[in-house]
Image: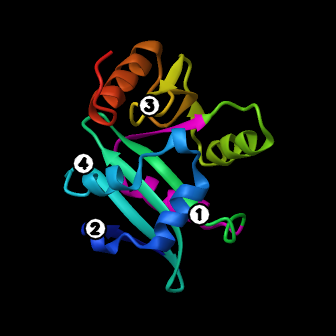
Amino acid sequence: MIQLFSVSNPTELTADLRKIYEEAFPADERREWVQLTALLPNPHFMLNKVYFQEQLIGILNYWTLDRFCYIEHFAISEYERNKGFGYGVLKSLLSGVSSSVILEVEEPVTEMARNRIAFYERLNFRILDGEYYQPPYSIDKKRVKMLLMCYSGINDPIDFLIAKTHLYQSVYQIKE
């Protein structure tokens, strides 16, 4: 059985969890570990360890914002991928939230990116129309051209702009 354990104390952030996080996301697409740790007291930020049969297999962190839930990072260990764990985790999350759910994905220029988009589409996420860049997490990182995908509720360009602005302000702490 897949289980999510919410992390509230920095001592719960293990080296194995860090390894999954850092191996799954390029440096420009993730926070530094110390930045992630600093977010733990934020009541809108949830960091979860994903377990299967008492074995750590992934990480899921998301934000519960006023208008939607934003999945910032979700990864299953490379050794546990393609076994249905990711699908199970997201189905569980989607059944527990009453708002729209948004996430970022890389543009479909690689096979892996296309597979990732197809995975989310099987869960009824859809790509939103509009130009989107993930802001840099720090001054030494680059912004990254991404796509926003949504599960329920965001339907038009005005909604896209509101969601984008809300992400930039609440998650990335920037004004645009």
Which sits earlier in the primary sequence, circle 2 or circle 4? 2
Mark 4 neighbour class, 10 Å CA radius: few under 14, some 14 to 19, many 20 or more: some
Specify whether 30 is left or right of 41: right
Tell me how far mark 2 sits from mark 4, CA to CA.
17 Å
Residue 59 at x, y = what percent? 48, 62
Q: Which residue, given by chain and number where applicable, does mark 1 sit on?
A: 76
Badge 4 is on which residue?
44
Nearest-to-viewer mark from 4 and 3:
3
| Residue found at x 47% / y 23% | 155
Q: Earlier in the sequence, mark 3 or mark 2?
A: 2
* Amino acid carrying mark 3 in the image: Pro
**Residue 86, position as x, y percentages in the image:** 59, 61
Q: Secondary structure at mark 3?
A: loop
Mark 2 surroundings: few (<14), some (14-19) or many (≥20) residues within 10 A: some
Q: Quick check: 120 above or below 12?
A: above
Residue 37 in the image: state x and y as whole percent.
31, 58
Identify the amino acid type marked 2: Pro
In-image side of 2 versus 61 (left or right): right
Magenta-colored span? 83-105
At a point 62% along the width and 45% down the height, the residue shown is 120
Is residue 4 highlighted in magenta? no
In this picture the colour scheme is: rainbow
Which of the two labelled residues, at mark 4 and mark 1, occupies the earlier sequence position?
4
* Mark carried by residue 10: 2
Residue farthest along the right direction in this orientation = 111
User: Helix, strand, or loop for circle 4?
Assistant: loop
In the rendered structure, which disc, 1 or 2, sits on the residue that comes first in sequence?
2
Q: Is residue 90 magenta?
A: yes
Q: Which residue is mark 3?
A: 136
Q: Is residue 37 left or right of residue 120?
A: left
Does dot 2 land on a helix, a strand or a loop? helix
